[in-house]
Image (cartoon, rainbow, N blue to C red):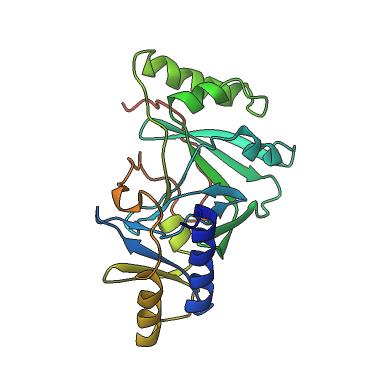
Amino acid sequence: MASNGEYESRRGKATREGLREEILGVAVKNARMRFFIPSTDNSFGGIKYTFVMIDSGCDSMLLPFPSNADDLRVFEEDIFTWQIFCSGGTPTLVISRIDGLSLGSVVLAGRQVIELPFLRFHLGSVSAQAMVAHERLDEDESAKLDSFLLQLGPNHILPERQHVLIGQTVLSKTYSLQAGKMLFIMRKGYLPVRDDLVAAWNVVKNLEKPVGFDDLVDDDHDGDWVTSFDDEDCTESCFMDEN
């Protein structure tokens, strides 16, 4: 039996050879009726993620907090800003560059999709606790997490996110099209023809599915954030007064 690394190499090779360069990614509907990229060769700003869900009906881009602390060290230089925001009462960590330049790329199934102006991480109970005293958060940002954890209480656990969510924040920078059990992400200006659909289906139907692919369901979106990469001015804090 081939190793998981060998399977992933086959998926990447099949994707590269079977799809036009204008088609940046293809998601497939799994047994739970959710669209996921049928590959584990995905990364955001160089941080690797096993599973990526595509949901054209939401605005968010939301990443699981990295399990390896080293993944964030490249963003600890002074050129980067770390801010805490909240959506639906759930905190997120947003990292961006002061100069507005890219932090890296979105890579799906080994193919580069777009450049990233920010990274947005979901914070569950464990990751919020780990971040509250982080040296890259100033006093005001840490206070937001303190408030969140205090209101959450010691007996309530907010689970960590398990997979990436991509919505219109990313998709608005591309063309996207649902065709049966597939969802295409394409360069703007390109519209697929019948041969593209057939070629893509011939690729994805023969791929070895990643372990657990058909069991994936949607984590809570915990609300939407910015609607596109052009609208990054978000000043909402945790537990705003609703009155």
Residue 32 x/y as whole percent? 24, 52
| Residue 40 in view | yes
Residue 110 x/y as whole percent? 55, 63
Write the residue at 54% across / 37% down. 66
Residue 96 x/y as whole percent? 62, 45
Write the residue at 42% across / 14% down. 150
Residue 54 x/y as whole percent? 38, 57
Query: Number of labelled discs?
Result: 0
Question: Does residue 81 appear to the left or right of 22 in the view shown?
Answer: right
User: What is the residue that sits farthest to the right in this orientation?
Assistant: 78
State the residue in front, 32 or 135.
32
State the residue in front, 20 or 192.
20
Quadrant position of the C terminus in the picture? top left
State the residue in front, 127 or 101.
127
Q: Is residue 198 above or below residue 220?
A: below
Q: Is residue 91 above or below residue 209?
A: above
Write the residue at 53% across / 73% down. 16
Q: Is residue 197 above or below residue 153?
A: below
Write the residue at 29% across / 55% down. 34
User: What is the residue that sits farthest to the front in this orientation?
Assistant: 1
Question: Does residue 67 appear to the left or right of 240 in the view shown?
Answer: right
| Residue 166 in view | no
Choose top left, top right, bottom left or bottom right for residue 9: bottom right
